[in-house]
Amino acid sequence: MNIPKELKYSKDHEWVKVEGNVAIIGVTDFAQSQLGDVVFVELPDELSTVKVGDSFSVIESVKAVSDIYAPVSGKIVKVNQALTDSPDLINQEPYGEGWIVVIEMSDSSELDDLLDSDAYAQLAAEGGH
Amino acid sequence: MTVKQTPLYETHLRYGGRIVEFGGWSLPVQYTGIKNEHQTVRTKAGVFDVSHMGEVVVNGPDALAFLQRLVTNDVSKLERNQILYTPMCYKHGGTVDDLLVYKKDADHYLLVINAANIEKDWNWMRENAEEFDVNLTNISNETAQIALQGPLSETIVSKLTDAPLSELKYYWFMPEIDIAGKKVLLSRTGYTGEDGFEIYCCPDDATYLWDTIMEVGRPLGLLPAGLGCRDTLRFEVCFPLYGHELSADISPIEAGLGIFVKLDKGEFNGQGTLQEQKTNGPKRRIVGFEMIDRGVARAEYPILVEGSYVGVVTTGTYAPSLDKNLGLGIIQAEYAKVGQKIDIEIRGKNVSAQVISKPFYKREGK
């Protein structure tokens, strides 16, 4: 299972890549493997605001419907429209072309509550709970 | 409730199956991925563990009379070694279960019932058997079942038996044949819309048979297949799933299974209601629909026409063979015509869809 060292992780299986005051968000390799074949992604509106823990997107696999929760608060400044036609990018490149949104963070101290790759690896090894 | 394991539980782990709980059983939802397994069954073959299904033996001089009362299809038409698909109804016409009836002899039948319904069916059968001279035996725990499904099924099984498989027609069975040296009952049945077999065996033989089938089938592309693709496969051919398209609240006529309801065969449970529904048309029907706007319909989502509630989704998912988001739902009969525009309420939003004809997928040839 791929858990890049340079990313931060939420307990809900989102990854966060910090670039200055923005955070790129996606779901982890572990999460996509658990979801199975992704067939639909409901994306949020650009410029909408989210708070930590808000469900801002829904990923549907063949059998399951899963909410995606905001790991940080802020404004959604970019949405990955490629997922509209190719939702399976989430399976193929969860950390690359399968990214979901970019959030302009309103409180970067929230990043301290996220897991590092070692802590996330342990969470995933325990079955993800 | 304790979650039960089939005799193949360890085998599933060995083959990389991802285990989930389904109707009280621990079973693999997938191995390599639902879409991949689905396409493999459609184009090559897949092997499924269906040992969780229930089996009840009916024997005795009144076996036929009892079954004729119990189920809606006409069991008297069966020949020895032939199989009948039939709903089983309550007196009010709702469905207790849908099942297969295997005729072993004039006074000896095998019923194959849904796993989640075993106890309910058993009680219902016992209650109905009181006025008949029959013996019922629940052999569910002593029976394992492996389904091999897909166009290469016959090629694969033929490598393991001398039995004349090409002579075995759809919905017929061989009561006792050797497969890989084990005695099994083999039927040409399945729930995927593809050609295939179901193998009933002793639980102790299940792992050996599974491994041997995989060994001879793997070079031809055979894969182990899980519950996930079993559902997408049966959904594409619009076979009903109990608890979704059939239930105590949904009659076989409403489900579009009228051809399995024989009103002229003599008295049976639910006959009055089913006769009335067949004559006047049911008030609700199961329809197939295709999403027009983006979204995946799921079971229990409301179906609306011009803002009014007209029914509910019974199964909805992505259909891998068709690359479309499709659904089945039960709606008021006046909206059941092909081409009817409907909305599916998905997470509070109305997403447009359209009634289309069933089945969504039909295999070519045999």
Image: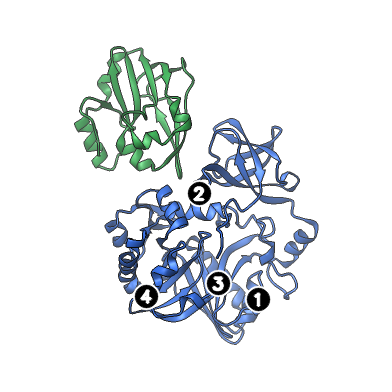
Chain colours: A green, B blue
Q: Earlier in the sequence, mark 3 or mark 4?
A: 3
> Can you name the residue that lies furthest to the bottom here?
B61
Say which residue label 3 marks: B171
Label 2: chain? Answer: B
Say which residue label 2 marks: B321
**Marks 2/1: CA distance?**
38 Å
Label 1: chain? Answer: B
**Marks 2/4: CA distance?**
34 Å
Work out whether B31 lies above or below B194. above
Q: From the image, state whether disc 2 or disc 1 is nearer to you.
A: 2
Q: Earlier in the sequence, mark 2 or mark 4?
A: 4
Q: Sort mark 4 into few (<14), some (14-19) or many (20+) by Cα contacts within 10 Å.
A: some
Q: From the image, state whether disc 1 or disc 3 is nearer to you.
A: 3
Say which residue label 1 marks: B68
User: Callout 2: helix, strand or loop?
Assistant: loop
The three-letter amino acid code for the residue at tag 2 is: Ser
Q: From the image, state whether disc 3 or disc 2 is nearer to you.
A: 2
The three-letter amino acid code for the residue at tag 3 is: Tyr
Identify which residue, B248 or A56, lies in the foreground: A56
User: Callout 4: helix, strand or loop?
Assistant: loop
Picture coordinates of residue A38, whole percent (x, y): 42, 39
Picture coordinates of residue B323, whole percent (x, y): 51, 43
**Visible residue check, residue B91:** no
**Visible residue check, residue B241:** yes
Say if labels 3 and 4 share a chain.
yes
**Marks 1/3: CA distance?**
19 Å
